[in-house]
């Protein structure tokens, strides 16, 4: 019960790693709110985790984010944990990248995540924790991954700077960087066919020393650790959950 009587907001909590984290936080006593873009999966998530509250909010919609956080503040709530998990994949070789694709990937995976932290600051105080989802893909030169890698690398850099700015306020900021994880996100890459994803999945498995995809729950356990008081002396860290892919390649 590490999160008993604590308020948690998960941005991008209606599927995959986000939903696994919502389940974990709720199981350990937290009052959990989460966002997603798809109302159907939000409703399904609330049914799967009774007592949680889901909101149809796109992290790139600044006005909607403002409204959500203003409602929380008006209700007198503060945040003990902010987990920013919203993100999207995007693979394309250099010759096929468009400015529209680049801007979309960076808007979701970098810009909106930084501004979400900025917007949530009035609700965060001493002892609170921010966790953001990165990716080992930010640090591996995988062909066709320039857009996603650049965005997640930028998020990693921003996380470290933000952690330094907020440390004096008693707010910890950390990143969890998954390796190949078996989640719906893998199949939501614009312009990538199902057959291409299947081939990519096999290639990912080959790159992991443990010879398997990770599960969302395995990443969620790392998220909960970083968010909890057990990690009270940890900030600006990037915890890789990747089956050894980064260090044992």
Image: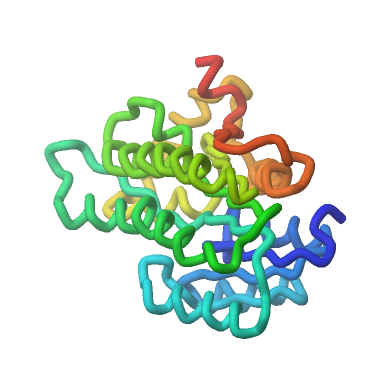
Q: Residue 120: horizontal and vertical position, in percent?
A: 52, 65
* Residue reaching furthest to the front: 168
Does residue 112 lie above or below 78 as drawn?
Answer: above
Residue 161 visible in rendering: yes
Q: Where does the image place residue 82, in percent across and percent down from the top left?
A: 60, 59
Q: Is residue 20 visible?
A: no
Q: Eyeballing the image, is 166 above or below 107?
A: above
Q: Quadrant of residue 248?
A: top right
Question: Looking at the image, is 219 positioned above or below residue 50?
Answer: above
Query: 177 left or right of 220?
Result: left
Q: Position of residue 98 (x, y in %)?
A: 15, 50
Q: Residue at x 40, y 34 (%)?
A: 138
Q: State the image quarter where residue 19 is shown.
A: bottom right
| Residue 19 shown left or right of residue 48 in the figure | left
The residue located at (47%, 31%) in the rendering is: 204
Residue that protrudes farthest toward the top in the picture: 248
Q: Could you tell me how many numbered marks the image carries?
A: 0
Along the viewing direction, whichever of 210 and 99 lies nearer the viewer = 99
Question: What is the quadrant of the N terminus in the image?
Answer: bottom right
Image spot of residue 70 (x, y percent): 52, 80
Residue at the outermost left position: 95
- Left or right: 238, with 64 as reference point: right
For the point 67% across and 75% down, which residue is it? 77
Q: Residue 35, relative to residue 43: is it above or below?
A: above
Is residue 79 rendered to the left or right of residue 192? right
């Amino acid at each position: 019960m590490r999160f008993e009587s604590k308020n948690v907001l998960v941005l991008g909590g209606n599927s995959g790693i986000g939903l696994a984290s919502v389940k974990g936080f709720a199981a350990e006593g937290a009052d959990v709110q989460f966002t997603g873009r798809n109302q159907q999966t939000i409703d399904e998530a609330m049914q799967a985790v009774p007592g949680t509250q889901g909101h149809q909010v796109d992290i790139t919609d600044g006005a909607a984010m403002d409204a959500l956080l203003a409602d929380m503040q008006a209700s007198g709530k503060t945040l003990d944990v902010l987990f920013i998990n919203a993100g999207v994949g995007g693979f394309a070789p250099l010759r096929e990248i468009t400015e529209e694709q680049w801007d979309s990937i960076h808007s979701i995976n970098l810009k909106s995540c930084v501004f979400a932290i900025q917007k949530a600051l009035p609700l965060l105080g001493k002892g609170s924790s921010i966790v953001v989802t990165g990716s080992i893909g930010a640090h591996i030169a995988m062909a066709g991954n320039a857009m996603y890698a650049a965005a997640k690398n930028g998020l990693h850099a921003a996380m470290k700077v933000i952690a330094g700015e907020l440390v004096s306020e008693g707010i910890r900021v950390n990143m969890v960087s998954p390796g190949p994880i078996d989640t719906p996100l893998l199949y939501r890459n614009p312009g990538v066919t199902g057959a291409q994803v299947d081939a990519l999945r096999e290639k990912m498995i080959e790159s992991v020393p443990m010879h398997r995809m990770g599960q969302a729950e395995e990443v969620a356990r790392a998220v909960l650790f970083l968010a909890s008081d057990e990690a009270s002396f940890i900030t600006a860290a990037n915890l890789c959950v990747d089956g050894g892919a980064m260090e044992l390649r």
